[in-house]
């Protein structure tokens, strides 16, 4: 299936060094071809002490994909809310796209969005500080 969303283009005064599109691609690599079994807040890799709270997606093969917020001075990326569409979780994910300047993320299947994420982000003082989700993939055998 083709991406049902137009390419997300940032406004004239928005700045990004490629971090946000890379984050979308990294998440897509982890979830496309699978089904989401559950989406919940939990412990994920990241943060100063090795783990932090974040969104944990459990896939049909048992793999856990974690999205952890990041913050570095005035730069940040944070998950503000997520909405799972349980009536669509039996469909295999075909892509990940964003709209509204990378503030609305869509994990979609052939029947529409399986999961929607509302994301806040800023590159801060362009591009001195780090931002973007810390994405971890933990296979079933770990």
Image: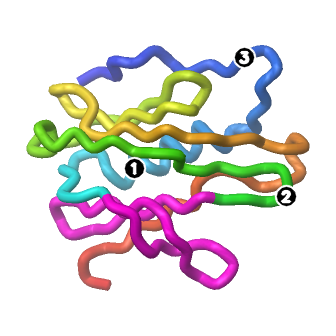
First along the sequence among labels 3 and 1: 3
Residue 1 lies, in percent from the top left, at 23, 24
Element assignment for label 3: loop
Which residue is under mark 1? 29
Q: Nearer the viewer, residue 120 or 129?
A: 120
Residue 94 lies, in percent from the top left, at 26, 36
Which numbered dot is residue 11?
3
**Label 3 environment density (alpha carbons within 10 Å; few <14, some 14–19, many ≥20):** few
Q: Residue at x 22, y 52 (%)?
A: 36
Q: Residue at x 16, y 26 (%)?
A: 111
Q: Nearer the viewer, residue 39 or 4?
A: 39
Q: Are marks 3 and 1 in contact (CB under 8 Å)?
A: no
- Residue 55 is inside the magenta segment: yes
Q: Are marks 1 and 2 in contact (CB under 8 Å)?
A: no
**Label 2 environment density (alpha carbons within 10 Å; few <14, some 14–19, many ≥20):** few
Residue 91 lies, in percent from the top left, at 13, 40
Q: How is the image coloured?
A: rainbow
Disc number lying in front (3 or 1)? 3
Which residue is under mark 2? 73
Kindly report the distance in space between the C-alpha atoms of the residues bearing marks 3 and 1.
26 Å
**Label 1 environment density (alpha carbons within 10 Å; few <14, some 14–19, many ≥20):** few
Q: Residue at x 67, y 44 (%)?
A: 19
Examine the rendered structure and indicate whether residue 12 appears above or below residue 93: above
Give the prevailing secondary structure in the magenta stretch: strand
């Amino acid at each position: 299936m083709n991406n049902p969303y137009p390419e997300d283009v940032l406004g004239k005064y928005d700045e990004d060094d490629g971090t946000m599109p890379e984050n979308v691609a990294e998440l897509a690599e982890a979830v496309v071809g699978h089904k989401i079994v559950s989406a919940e807040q939990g412990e994920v890799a990241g943060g100063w002490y090795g783990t932090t709270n974040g969104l944990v997606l459990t896939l049909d093969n048992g793999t856990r994909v974690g999205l952890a917020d990041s913050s570095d001075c005035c730069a940040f990326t944070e998950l503000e809310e997520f909405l799972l569409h349980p009536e669509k979780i039996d469909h295999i994910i075909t892509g990940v796209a964003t709209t509204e300047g990378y503030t609305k993320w869509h994990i979609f299947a052939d029947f529409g969005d399986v999961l929607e994420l509302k994301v806040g982000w800023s590159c801060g003082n362009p591009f001195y500080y780090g931002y973007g989700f810390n994405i971890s993939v933990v296979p079933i055998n770990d």
